[in-house]
Every structure is written in structure tokens, then in C-alpha cells.
Image (cartoon, grey):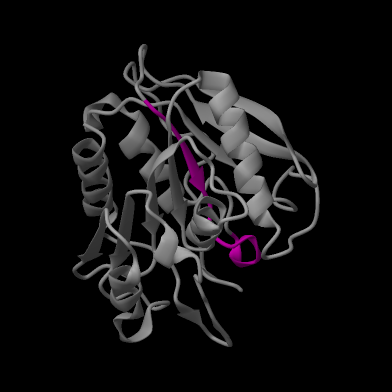
Amino acid sequence: MICGMTSTTAPAKPITSPATAALRSLSIPGPAGRLEAVVNEGAPHSRFAALICHPHPLGGGNMQNKVVYYAMKALNDPQWGLGWPVLRFNFRGTGLSHGVHDGHAEIGDVLAALDWLENEYRLPLVLVGFSFGAAMALSACCSPVHTPKNVRALALLGLPTQVPGFEYRYPHLHACTIPKLFLSGADDQFDPNSQLASLAASAPEPKRLVLLPRADHFFTGQLEPMQTALAGWLKEQLQ
């Protein structure tokens, strides 16, 4: 289930400014061992805390992925009007995270990260995933086996529907009543024939589908419009 074979990475040490929240490195307990993670601390009295899941590790995906980094900035940087604490982590077998890539068991990594985030901040949670991370986030939130109770919104960036040799299935989506944002590029190469539109149409409300013009799977040249759509939907949904 490889999605994002040419994943790009943001700078490991981004330029900071007085408005940039503190960055804290840590490890969290996961079902296959410790998970490498970082937290961008939020503003005082934040109303929510967020988790962002990275794209496929076999395609080079990790928590420093450029789309993941820009999504974090939209949720964490005060200029976007949210200022939340944001957790990013490496899936099992990626970076310093323990374990071996599985392709499905990473759902347990998402749940472990959500548990850590809830215990650390005692706030309602927002879950964001990009590509493979979006698929794992959706499964973690919408499977009847899991269903975390404190996730108030689910943003799916570049949710894949089909990659060479594999077609993604989301059988539990029809019963997923968490507010959902489907945000992809109109030219996403892993969404042939606009299958995402049909998938989103099958999901229950509340939901929104946003297809950014001239954007591919990686939002190349369209990262700021992605941030605008993501932050705008969250402010509207969680006001």
C-alpha cells in the first residue's frame, strides 16, 4: 500500500521566529515499542490539541514531510488563528521508532499517539493525516473496533483511493459521524477518475470535500491554499 513514492521533506530545523512555539522532542509508547515524536507547543489556554500522521514510510514518508510540516504550521502558528499544540510522530520502523512497517497495524500507532496527546493536554482532539497517514487516521477513527471518543474533527489530506497495483477500501466510512474534511488536489495522481468525490459522497454528514485546482497529490505549489482550506474549515467547524 505505497502512496507517495517521491515524498518530500521539510527542513529538520526550520527557521524560528518569536511567534514560533517551542518544539519538544520525545518518544511515546506504542504497540510495537517506542515511537519517535515531536510536539510543537501551543498557545496558553488552547481549546484543542492536534495529531498529524505522515505519508507512507516505504515512499520516504516521515514526520518531517513537507505537507505534514505545513499542516502543522496551519494548526500551530498563531498567524493562522488556532495556536494549538500539535504532535507529529514516526510510524513503526520509521526514523527512530521501534518495530517494522506493516501497512495495517499502524492504526495502533495512531491510537497510541492519540492516547498520549489526550493524557498530556486533557483537551479535545483533532486528527489530521496525509496520504497513507490519512488512511490510517480514518481507520483509527471510524472502525467500530476503535472509535476514539475525544476526536472532534478528522481532516484527510490527499486520501488515496488507488495506487499502482492496489485499491484502497474504507468500509467503515459510511458509519463515521465525526466531522470530516476531504482535502486533495484536483490533479491528485492517486485519485483516478475523481474517486474521492464518490467516496466523500458516501460518507455521512458533517463533511466537506475540497479539491484544490492545479494541485497534485503533494500540493506542489499549492501548500498555502492547502493551509488556508484546512485552517478555515477547522475554525468554522469548531467555533
> x%, y% of residue 77?
32, 29
Identify whether 174 is placed above or below 8: below
Magenta-highlighted residues: 48-60
Closer-to-camera residue (221/34) = 34
Find out whether residue 191 is within the magenta segment. no
Closer-to-camera residue (214/129) = 129
Q: Quadrant of the N terminus?
A: bottom right
Toward which corner of the image does residue 46 lie, by quadrant? top left
> x%, y% of residue 39?
53, 28
Closer-to-camera residue (24/132) = 132
Residue 179 in view in this figure: yes
Residue 90 in view in this figure: no
Identify whether 41 is placed above or below 88: above
Residue at x 57% of width, y 21% of height: 120
Direction from residue 46 to residue 52 in the image, left or right: right
Direction from residue 212 to residue 63 in the image, left or right: right
> x%, y% of residue 129?
46, 52
Toward which corner of the image does residue 158 lie, by quadrant? bottom left
> x%, y% of residue 233?
23, 45
Number of numbered tags placed on the structure image: 0
